[in-house]
């Protein structure tokens, strides 16, 4: 697992509120997607769940982007059906894949398999076929997880590997952050390191404190977001609001 601590501290763009952050990021994301479409004829957008990006997704869905040329891929997923509570697919369909963005293609990470560990090989092929990610939107938990890279989870080593499959199955340790949803599927560091743009979007004083803790020395397994923060080659931008 990545353990270096010599990468420079990345700047954190602080916004006056969620509306200001939403407006700026929606504009920036639209520009990235439009540039990808002009350059390559299509764009691949990877998105996360959680309450923080909901206003951003709703704003983005109303913008005049050639959505028929955009593919939306989940960063991670709880092992529940799309119509069940906690599903990131259900969340993204309600917040992003509406309005003008309803024309986008969608790639989910939930299959009929009983376990994500049974589904990983097939999903790896699906994600590889989607191509290189143009932009990935990530969040971070107060425990220092991002995507579904939970501290000391089963499958974490594979998820944090810089080489290998683009997805990994995870079984998280129970915590207040995971709730009952311990089984997950997630994009890996190997997949995200190929992204052209990475956006880490966080909100709240507790998340800011967690970010500062993750920027300090310590094992990656304790706060897996460190795998991103310590990789100086990643095109990572961090945005925060209270």
Image: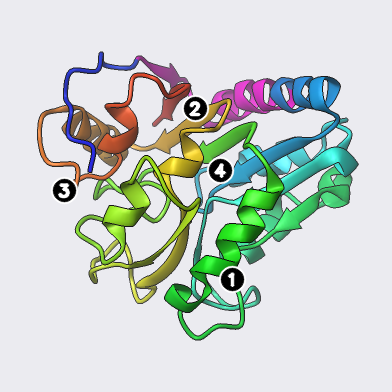
What secondary structure characterizes most of the magenta part?
Answer: helix
Alpha carbons under labels 2 and 3: distance apart: 30 Å
Q: Look at 64% across and 73% down and name the residue there.
A: 82
Q: Image quadrant of residue 8?
A: top left
* Residue 222: mark in rendering: 3
Residue 241 position, x and y percent, is 43, 29
Above or below residue 91? Residue 63 is above
Q: Residue furthest front?
A: 164
Residue 142 position, x and y percent, is 27, 47
Q: Is residue 86 visible?
A: no
Q: Residue furthest bottom?
A: 114
Alpha carbons under labels 3 and 4: distance apart: 25 Å
Label whose residue precedes the other's in the sequence (3 or 1):
1
Label whose residue precedes the other's in the sequence (4 or 1):
4
Residue indicated by mark 2: 17
What span is colored magenta in the figure?
11-30
Label whose residue precedes the other's in the sequence (2 or 3):
2
Residue indicated by mark 4: 53
Q: Look at 71% across and 43% down and name the residue there.
A: 58
Secondary structure at badge 4 equals loop
Q: Are marks 3 and 4 in contact (CB under 8 Å)?
A: no
Label whose residue precedes the other's in the sequence (4 or 2):
2
Q: Is residue 112 visible?
A: yes
Residue indicated by mark 1: 110
Secondary structure at badge 1 equals loop
Secondary structure at badge 2 equals loop
Confirm whether the magenta stretch covers residue 20. yes
């Amino acid at each position: 697992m990545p353990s270096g601590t010599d990468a420079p501290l990345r700047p954190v763009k602080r916004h006056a509120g969620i509306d200001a952050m939403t407006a700026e990021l929606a504009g920036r994301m639209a520009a990235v997607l439009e540039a990808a479409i002009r350059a390559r004829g299509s764009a691949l957008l990877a998105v996360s769940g959680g309450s923080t990006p909901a206003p951003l997704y709703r704003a983005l869905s109303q913008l005049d982007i050639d959505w028929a040329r955009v593919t939306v891929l989940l960063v991670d997923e709880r092992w529940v059906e799309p119509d069940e509570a906690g599903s990131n697919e259900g969340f993204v369909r309600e917040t992003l894949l509406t309005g003008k963005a309803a024309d986008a293609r969608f790639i989910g990470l939930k299959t009929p398999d009983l376990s994500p560990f049974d589904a990983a090989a097939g999903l790896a092929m699906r994600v590889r076929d989607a191509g290189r990610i143009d932009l990935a939107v990530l969040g971070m938990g107060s425990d220092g997880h991002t995507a579904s890279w939970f501290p000391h989870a089963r499958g974490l080593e594979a998820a944090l590997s810089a080489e290998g499959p683009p997805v990994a199955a995870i079984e998280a340790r129970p915590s207040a952050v995971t709730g009952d949803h311990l089984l997950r599927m997630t994009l890996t560091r190997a997949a995200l390191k190929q992204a052209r743009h990475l956006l880490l979007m966080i909100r709240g004083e507790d998340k800011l404190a967690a970010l500062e803790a993750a920027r300090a020395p310590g094992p990656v397994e304790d706060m897996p977001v460190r795998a991103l923060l310590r990789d100086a080659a990643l095109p990572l931008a961090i945005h925060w609001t209270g």
